[in-house]
Image (cartoon, grey):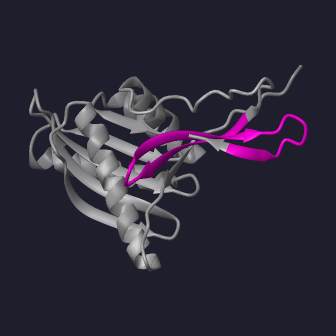
Amino acid sequence: MERLAVQDHQVLVLAAGDTPAARNNARGHLFENFVALLLHEYGYEAPTTSDLNVHSDGIEIDITATNTITHQRAVVECKAYTSNVRAQACTSFLGKLQLARYETDDNVFGYFFALPRLVAEGEEVAKKARTRDKHFRYFNVTDVVNLLRNRRLITEPPEETRAVAHLLSDPAVMITEHGIYSCAKSLDPVTHRADSVLV
């Protein structure tokens, strides 16, 4: 039996700046714009950011948005880290969602984005919440990539034009000031070392 490694995409937020603080600030706003674009593609008006934190291992955003057609409100939390997100982040969001429902009505939607994904315990929390709450959705990196592909905001990286097909590794979505791109490393078929990046 041949082994097959399944790789998650990475989400890379790339920004320029003269200092680490300036780069972090630019990264935070690029990610904020990315989330706003994604929500807009799926029917939401320009969202309102209530909290934006950027630190060395990730970006956190709290957002409220209103659906353009139904006018239903959504509470959105996005966590993009270098490693999987702890379960406590999901339980905390579920508490915020319930408070939002107490303040307005029971129809507030809740969207929790955890990139790359929740840890196993968090996945279980999100799964249980989803079975009991039809207005709650959890999105990991694979879900986000699928949302982007469904709206044709990204495509697969370009195919190799050489006669020898190369292996691809490290799939990623790059968020930059110039746009959103899908990319992957092309590996030499003999050495298995990256010899180019396809964007």
Of residue 148 and residue 140, the one placed in the foreground of this image is 148
Q: Quadrant of residue 153?
A: top left
Q: Residue at x 26, y 30 (%)?
A: 42
Instruction: Give the quarter of the figure containing the N terminus.
Output: top right
- On screen, 192 above or below 53? above
- Say if the magenta span includes residue 171: yes
Judge from the rendering whether residue 123 lies leftward or rightward of residue 132; answer left or right: right
List x then y, in percent, for residue 129.
39, 36
Left-right relation of 49 to 59: left
> Of residues 98 and 135, which is closer to you in this image?
135
Compared across the picture, whether 62 is left or right of 164 comes to left
Q: Is residue 76 magenta?
A: no
- Residue furthest out toward the front: 162
Q: Main secondary structure of the magenta part?
A: strand
**Residue 1 vs residue 87, the one in the foreground:** 1
Residue 22, position as x, y percentages in the image: 38, 75
Image coordinates for residue 21, horizontal then vertical, percent: 41, 78
69 shown above or below 179: above
User: Hey, which residue is sitting farthest top in the picture?
Assistant: 1
Q: Quadrant of the C terminus?
A: top right
Q: What is the magenta range? A: 168-196
Residue lying at 87% horizontally and 22% vertically, measured from the top left: 2
199 above or below 29?
above
**Residue at point 19%, 36% (across, down):** 44
Q: Residue at x 19, y 48 (%)?
A: 47
Residue 80 place in picture, x, y as percent: 46, 54
- Closer to us: 91 or 156: 156
Q: How many marks?
A: 0
Q: In terms of image quadrants, where is residue 160?
A: top right
